[in-house]
Structures are given as C-alpha cells and as structure tokens.
Image: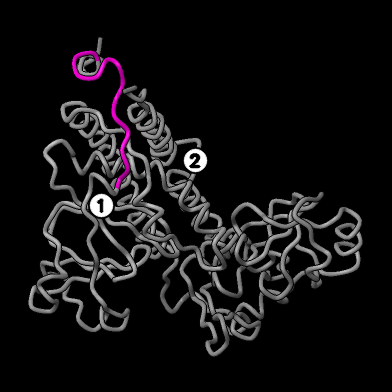
C-alpha cells in the first residue's frame, strides 16, 4: 500500500465532502491599471508582481499601488479573458481588475491543492468562454460555483507533494531544453555569419516569389479531402479543407510548391516557415509564399536555416503586419558555395533533430512527463463523494 493509499484509508475511507469553491476560498479583486501603465511603471527587480492576460506581467514597488490592491496570501490567480487559465503565486502580487484570485483562511484547505484541482477545470471553462462570444471570457460565478472535492488536509498535502515533484522535474527538463535551444541558436548564428569573402545576395535573385491561386471562403469547408492552411493554422493542424477536384484543378493550372520548397508566412505569424513535404495540401494565397528556387545557387534547406534568423523587414499600417513580396525580394542572405551550404546544413540538422524531434531526446521526454503528470493528477484528484 502506498503512502497515499494509506492516508485515504486512514482519513476518508468512505469518501470526501464536495463543496463550492466560493464557500471555501476568499475571492480578491485586482487593481485598475492599463497595459500602457504596466509598461511605463515596470521595474524588473521590484517586489510586487502584476499579472495581466496570458503571460504578460510587470513588477512594481509597493508605493506604486494602493495598499489594498496588493495581495500577500499564497493564491490562485484566475485569468478570465483571452487565455483562460489558473496560476499559483505565493509572493506579493496584484493583477488587472478584470481578473480575480482566491486564497483560503481555513485551516482545512491547502491553497496549492485547490490550484492543482482548478487546473483540471480549465478545459471546461475554456469551452464555456468560447461559447460566450468572439472574445473568450468567463464570469465570477463560473468559478465560484465550481464543485471541489475536499479531502482531509493530510491527503491534500500528499497530493501537493506528489504533483510538485512532477512539476519540478518537468521544469528541469524544460530548462535543459531551453538551454539546448539557446546553444543551437548560438551555433546557427555563428555558422551563418560570414566575412566579406562570402557574397550577399537578395532573395529576388534566387528565385521568383510564388503563391497559390486564391481560394475563396465559399470554396472551403470544415471537412474535406485536402487540408487548407491559413496564417492562423500554418505549421499547425488545419481547420479548413477544399475538395479534391478544386485541388487537382488549381495545382495544375496555377503556381504550386514542389517538394522541398520553404513556405513562408507573410502575414500575422511573419517568418514562420514550413518545408513542403509533397503531401496534398493547399495554402492561403499571398499570406503564405515561397521562392521558386531551382537550387542552382542556394539549397532550400540552407534557405530554411537562413529564414530562421528572421531577416525580414515587415510593413506596418494595416490591421496586421505584412511581409510584402518586395520586402522578401530585397532581403539579403550570405551565399557561400553549395559545398559549404551542405556542410552547414548537416551540422544544423543534427542540432535541430535533438531539439525538435518529438520521437527522440528531450522533447519526447517532456511530452511523456506531461502525459504522466496529467494521468496522476486526474487520478489523485478523483474522489468518491461522502454520502450524508
């Protein structure tokens, strides 16, 4: 019998009480502050952390905020707009006032336990938020009414200990992967930086900027034969498709990438690149482009690594930043001999494989740990309800 099983047998063999979050935790407000104010007042080494949506944070001195708006309890912060998620924090903090946070003043509640349970509710809350309109958002009652299993404190503490260990190990692996990526970027930049003896060449001299023929919205569907990639799904799973007949017609009549061409996102996610693998797929006209390269001067794989250094000069002024064809044509890269390009590509391929191949190395281990953590978290936080 494990320690956890023994604690269950000793403390709650017949089940646990289920309660509303609002009945066992104290909800606290944030502070009225704008993104501009956060940016202006941010002091990287200041003691009070201010949370906005997503990963946006700033650091303030105590005197920068009303004392009533500074929370000193270990708490669970509820990010309620855009990215719906919970975050645990145990140092002085505040947050924008459209968010809220929870702490507990009860002796039978471990706030870190509540945090781990609330993480299991994020998917449900995100689905609810998305259904409320164009901008995902939840309201205070959505969290206040969440039903929480509340085992005795020794059981909560053991769950926190187990899940903390998983989290710390994942953080160590992620830190190692991050260090590997920085090492890779350092060597990539070093390998792709040359002296005056290597000529610079504008991309327009390497090949013509090409794009697929425009596909109109009414020609797409949510299910179909051929994936259709837009700037939002480029490099990810598609959410639109076109019929096989349209694909066959358009790839025959109009420009279409050949296997090995490097596709470039030219709007929104500027500079995101994908090497076309030759599988049936279609791409969103001027938002996703490629250089029609015969590889007589530059190999496509060498181009791919040059693009990763983000040499682009995008144009502002519209709703989204855009990389126009002229921007691409004028962009210059160093062009060593094809033999030297092959040598550089071979080195970078090995580095890249270590960092990004999901079936080998650290990324695979991190993914395995994530799945293992989620499995144990869900198992540890599943209880039988105590009947009155």
In the shown orientation, is residue 381 left or right of residue 230? left
Q: Nearer the viewer, residue 267 or 165?
A: 165
Label 2 environment density (alpha carbons within 10 Å; few <14, some 14–19, many ≥20): some
Q: How is the image coloured?
A: one colour
Q: Secondary structure at mark 2?
A: loop
Secondary structure at badge 1 equals strand
Give the image quarter of residue 54.
bottom left
- Seen in the picture, residue 10 relative to 56 is either above or below; the reply is above
- Percent coordinates x, y for residue 278 in the rendering: 74, 51
Check if residue 20 falls in the magenta segment.
yes
Please state if 54 lies on the left or on the right of 33 as rendered. right
Magenta region = 9-21
View extreme (bottom): residue = 317
Residue depicted at 32% across the width and 46% down the height: 174
Q: Residue at x 20, y 77 (%)?
A: 42
Q: Quadrant of the C terminus?
A: top left
**In the image, is 383 to the left or to the right of 291?**
left
Which residue: 53% across, 82% down? 314
- The residue wearing badge 2 is 358
Q: x, y percentage for residue 223?
A: 77, 50
Q: Which residue is mark 1?
A: 76
Which quadrant of the view contains residue 69? bottom left
Q: Say if the magenta span includes residue 108.
A: no
Q: Is residue 126 above or below residue 99?
A: above
């Amino acid at each position: 019998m494990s320690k956890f099983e023994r604690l269950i047998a000793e403390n709650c063999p017949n089940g646990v009480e289920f309660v509303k979050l609002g009945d066992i935790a104290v909800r606290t407000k944030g502070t009225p502050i704008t993104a501009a104010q956060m940016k202006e007042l941010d002091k990287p080494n200041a003691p009070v952390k201010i949370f906005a949506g997503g990963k946006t944070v700033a650091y303030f001195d105590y005197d920068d905020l009303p004392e009533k708006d500074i929370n000193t309890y270990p708490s669970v912060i509820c990010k309620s707009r855009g990215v719906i998620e919970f975050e645990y924090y145990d140092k002085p903090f505040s947050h924008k006032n459209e968010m809220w946070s929870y702490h507990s003043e009860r002796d039978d509640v471990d706030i870190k336990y509540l945090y781990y349970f609330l993480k299991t509710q994020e998917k449900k809350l995100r689905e609810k938020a998305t259904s409320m309109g164009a901008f995902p958002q939840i309201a205070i009652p959505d969290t206040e009414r969440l039903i929480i299993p509340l085992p005795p404190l020794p059981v909560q503490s053991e769950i926190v200990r187990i899940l903390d260990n998983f989290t710390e190990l994942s953080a160590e692996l992620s830190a190692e992967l991050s260090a590997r990526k920085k090492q890779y970027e350092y060597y990539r930049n070093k390998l792709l930086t040359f002296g005056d003896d290597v000529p610079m060449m504008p991309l327009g001299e390497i090949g013509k900027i090409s794009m697929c023929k425009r596909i109109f919205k009414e020609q797409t569907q949510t299910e179909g034969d051929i994936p259709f990639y837009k700037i939002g799904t480029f490099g990810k799973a598609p959410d639109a498709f076109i019929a096989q007949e349209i694909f066959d017609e358009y790839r025959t009549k109009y420009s279409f990438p050949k296997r090995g061409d490097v596709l470039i996102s030219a709007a929104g996610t500027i500079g995101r690149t994908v090497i076309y693998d030759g599988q049936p797929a279609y791409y969103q006209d001027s938002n996703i482009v490629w250089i029609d390269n015969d590889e007589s001067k530059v190999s496509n794989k060498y181009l791919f690594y040059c693009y990763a250094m983000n040499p682009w000069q995008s144009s502002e002024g519209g709703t989204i930043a855009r990389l126009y064809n002229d921007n691409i044509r004028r962009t210059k890269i160093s062009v060593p001999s094809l033999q030297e390009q092959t040598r550089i590509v071979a080195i970078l391929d090995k580095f890249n494989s270590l960092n990004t191949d999901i079936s080998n190395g650290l990324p695979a281990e991190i993914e395995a740990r994530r799945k293992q953590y989620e499995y144990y978290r869900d198992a540890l936080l599943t209880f039988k309800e105590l009947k009155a």
